[in-house]
Amino acid sequence: MAVSSNRIVRWVDDRLPIFTLMHHSTSAYPTPNNLNYWWNFGSLAGFVLVVMILSGIFLAMNYTPHTAHAFESVERIMRDVNYGWLLRYLHMNGGSMFFALVYIHLFRGMYYGSYKSPREVLWWIGVIIFICMMATAFMGYVLPWGQMSFWGATVITNLFSAVPLVGTEIVTWLWGGFSVDNPTLNRFFSLHYLLPFIIFGLVVVHLWALHTVKSNNPLGIDIKGPQDTIPFHPYYTIKDLYGIGLFLMFYLFFVFFAPNFFGEPDNYIPANPMVTPPHIVPEWYFLPFYAILRAVPDKLSGVVLMFAAILVLFVLPWLDTSKVRSARFRPIYKQLFWIFFLDCLILGWIGAKPPEGAYLVIGRIATVYYFAHFLILLPLTGWFEKPRPLPDSIGAPVITTVKR
Amino acid sequence: MRRLFILIVMALATPAVALASSEKVSLETQHWSWQGLFGSYDQAQLKRGFKVYKEICASCHALGLVAYRNLADIGFAEEEIKAIAAEKEIQDGPNDMGEMFSRSARPSDPFVSPYSNDPAARVANNGALPPDLSLIAKARAGGPDYLYSLLVGYAEPPTDITLVPGMSYNRVFPGHQIAMPQPLFEDMVSHDDGTSSSLPQLAKDVTAFLNWTAEPELNARHSLGLKTLAFLILLTALFYALKRQMWSDVH
């Protein structure tokens, strides 16, 4: 198939089929014709990644990764760099937006069973992207070198001291010294700049896997033929653009009118190793995992559970024993999904509270439920649940309504 | 000396810890001119607030992130700014002879700090360190409402509270014992434009000024934000119409 009538384009394409590749992956890609708006969040997350990389590159041009200058260099960006406040607030709020979008993307995958065969590898790459995002966000939060930056870095890096035998050595190695200090800030800056490009590469692989196995859809059934699909362009490009417009209004509202809504006031106090803030809290997107960490009185078990809470996602495709993908046809799983969603919200709320009294009890129950959902409820539901009958094809329900 | 330092830090940290497990105080929420989508600073108020800062706060609190030239944003003329800066002496150098020398501050200099370093500030203030105020409106939960409530929140301590010597009772300060004595009183600063010099008015004006030092970009941010949102509403409506039209043959 000729990709273009332009001779120069054809000349290049015969030698390096880059135009054919782009045509196949962005334009002709056959997409199920019944995707709902929950399918917008993947492309939205990709859009925010680009916004983050671009704003980050320009911020890095004006930032100084040194404990004596980092805080003031950020304030210089805010005050003296042309539109520096815009770059900085775009980047700061972009982090929160990125996580919000990816969490919705992840829950959408759970609801519609997008992790099931043949999409396990696609799902794995998604989980790896999520882990890289968490590392990037954590290190980025350290860079302004405010009180929460410093003490957040101290608390989180100290988690590794729970490793038996070599814990202290690992922490010293991570810090590049005997406390969070200039070497720590330097390496965090270096890695914070590196990781987004790795995430970008992983997104390309994520899309590669997606385009190999094709998109899942709200019915969770396979594409039976061309009648079930439409080309990505123009149908989904315009739908994604509409989604981007809506999202930008939401995102930029915070940037322009409530830029510190997601932030902690303490981070506008320069880091001071001699004064511990009374209440050290991570950014909102880490709160559920922070709650799991603190639910266990033993440090090592807490750390293991926190990492397990993320790693369990890797085996989700095998823990869910049902062959039916979409929750639409799974009456019991549908309810379990919403209870699990609520459980994650409760964990997030507990993560923001001090670990004492009733908060600790609720946090422990919610932690137990989090793991029970994956390890007990999902396998059992798959075996005992009676799914509702699946339609024959994506087009079938539409065709029957037309006939009536 | 080092032990003394640790003691001081602990003494300052204790009230903060005490609050973490105690009651929440209610702030005296005010209406601020810069709130809301259409909010912007009231330049006259910022100028009055600057006067309060200059005559009272500046004797203990630095404003290190703000330069004298920034005063142009709140309506001071170039000559006025030069005069304000020239009131302060700073050390510069070394000169061609290799010597440090003293000169009057210029508009490009940041506000001159009242103390040459932190230990000097502590010695002069009974061991407490008066914080730099550049970002204070963003660095405290409650922001301007907290600052205002703190400034008008001094009172006689309730009978069940015994104050540490040198501390004052404050309704909203974490732990209620604050090292800063009540800084503002009625009629301390007089205004040429006939604005009242009541305590609430002085507190409001200086809080507005400190919000400007923390968010000097706010006016530009709100104005660009409105234009951006208006543009996005049109663009998104256009995308929606296009989407409806392009999809009309699918369903």
Image (cartoon, coloured by chain):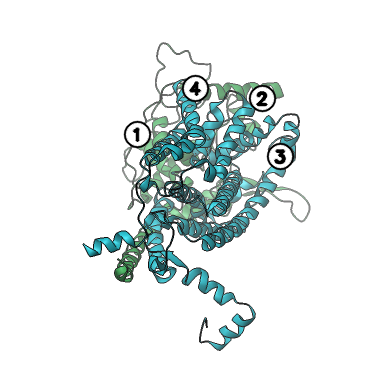
Identify the residue under disc 4.
A356
- Circle 2 residues within 10 Å: few <14, some 14–19, many ≥20: few
Q: Is residue A376 above or below residue A188?
A: above
| Rendered location of residue A269, percent (x, y) | 55, 38
Res A175 label: 3
In the picture of the structure, the residue carrying the numbered disc 2 is: B5
**In this view, which residue lies farthest toward the left?**
A404
Residue type highlighted by circle 4 = Glu
- The residue carrying mark 1 is B200
Give the Cα separation between the discs numbered 3 and 1: 48 Å
Question: Does B45 appear above or below B241?
Answer: above
The quarter of the picture where the C terminus of chain B appears is bottom left
| Mark 4 neighbour density, 10 Å: few (under 14) some (14–19) many (20 or more) | few
In 3D space, how far apart are the residues under numbered discs 1 and 2 (Cα atoms)? Answer: 36 Å
Res. B50 in view: no
The lab-note entry on whether marks 4 and 1 share a chain reads: no
- Mark 1 and mark 2 lie on one chain; the one further toward the N terminus is 2
Q: Position of residue A403 (x, y in %)?
A: 23, 64
Label 3 and label 2 in one chain: no
Element type where label 2 sits in the image: helix
Of residue B222 and residue A387, the one placed in the foreground of this image is A387
Residue type at tag 3: Trp
* Chain B pictured colour: green
